[in-house]
């Protein structure tokens, strides 16, 4: 038994030495790559100003140094001191093309952009077949039923004046809370509604963006009397908690504007409610005007002047 323990201890020691060796090799490899990158930036042939003859000597020196660095890096890669994967990760594409590690800088950059898009920006695809229409109908019923329990507040000059006089409110919903002071349990109602909406999205496999789109439709249809309820709902929702979230809401509103304006004449009757909703969202800082402005029409100042003259 004693001999076995000694052998185990010896094996553990060899394993520790091997691990230390691998770690040391990895650190040396990274140090070589970082050194090559720094020298490559410092010795770029175009770092000297070619318009002045006084820099000619420095240009020639940089060119010679770059050639030496290129040959040295090729030797490090061919000998296995630096792996090609780490070189592609850390070194500039132009330098990699000169090494022969990549076919061309342009193709490498395009591939990196596509890979970065897939890894970081690819959206989850929702199967419309798996989304049950019952979930959307329940969502509309739930939102409308909660709204019906709220005291309606028509958009009035007094409310708009209060907003104008308090542009730096500590809370975006401060004016809304003031307008709904008669309903003390508003915040609790909103929180319960958001929990129920999350449950519906999970149970019926709904796309959250489609759910938001439906809530905006409900907002638009009831904007005259129940605008304060929807402002409070969106202000507390996960769809309006950051600038990126605000951009998504602005895009949805912008697409609705384009859809109704560019659609048949029968759809134009909804533009008043839609523009009122957009104005309220901007006023209460739930969306930003610059995010929406690019989707408005007319798109050019000449078209604006022409429409104004007409």
Image: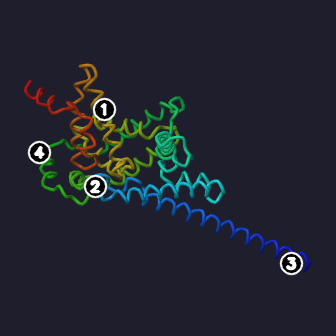
Q: In this view of the protein, which residue sits in the foreground, 165 or 138?
A: 165
Q: Which mark is residue 240?
A: none
Against 11, residue 280 (above or below) is above
Where's residue 189, x and y in %?
36, 50
- Sequence-wise, the earlier of marks 2 and 3 is 3
Query: Which quarter shows the C terminus?
Result: top left
For the residue pair 257 and 138, the one nearer the viewer reads as 257
Residue position for label 1? 256
Image quadrant assignment for residue 230? top left
Residue contact between numbered discs 2 and 3, judged by CB atoms under 8 Å: no
* Residue indicated by mark 4: 157
Determine whether the residue tagged by mark 4 lies in a helix, strand or loop. helix
Left or right of 183 in this view: 83: right
Tag nearer the camera, 2 or 3: 2
Residue picked out by circle 2: 52
Mark closer to the chain start, 4 or 3:
3
Q: Position of residue 143 (x, y in %)?
A: 37, 40
Q: Which residue is mark 3?
A: 6
- Judge the density around disc 2: few (<14), some (14-19), many (≥20) Cα neighbours within 10 Å: few
């Amino acid at each position: 038994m004693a001999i076995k323990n000694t052998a185990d201890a010896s094996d553990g020691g060899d394993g520790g030495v091997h691990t230390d060796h691998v770690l040391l090799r990895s650190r040396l490899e990274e140090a070589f790559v970082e050194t090559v990158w720094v020298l490559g930036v410092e010795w770029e042939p175009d770092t000297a100003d070619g318009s002045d003859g006084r820099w000619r000597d420095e240009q020639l020196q940089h060119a010679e140094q770059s050639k030496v660095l290129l040959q040295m890096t090729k030797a490090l890669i061919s000998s296995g001191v630096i792996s090609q994967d780490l070189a592609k990760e850390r070194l500039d594409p132009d330098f990699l093309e000169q090494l022969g590690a990549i076919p061309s800088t342009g193709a490498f950059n395009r591939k990196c952009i596509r890979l970065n898009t897939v890894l970081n920006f690819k959206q989850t695809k929702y199967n419309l077949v798996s989304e049950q229409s019952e979930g959307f109908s329940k969502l509309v019923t739930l939102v409308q039923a909660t709204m019906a329990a709220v005291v309606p507040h028509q958009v009035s000059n007094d409310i708009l004046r209060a907003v104008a006089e308090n542009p730096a409110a500590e809370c975006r919903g401060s004016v809304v809370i003031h307008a709904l002071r008669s309903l003390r349990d508003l915040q609790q109602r909103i929180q319960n509604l958001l929990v129920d909406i999350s449950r519906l999205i999970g149970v019926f496999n709904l796309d959250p963006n489609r759910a938001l789109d439906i809530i905006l439709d409900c907002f638009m249809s009831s904007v005259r009397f129940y605008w304060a309820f929807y402002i409070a709902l969106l202000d507390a929702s996960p769809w309006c908690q950051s600038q990126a979230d605000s951009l998504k809401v602005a895009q949805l509103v912008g697409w609705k504007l384009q859809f109704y304006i560019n659609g048949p004449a029968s759809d134009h009757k909804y533009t008043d409610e839609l523009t009122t909703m957009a104005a309220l969202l901007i006023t209460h800082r739930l969306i930003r005007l610059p995010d929406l402005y690019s989707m408005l029409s007319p798109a050019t100042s000449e078209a604006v002047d022409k429409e104004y003259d007409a």
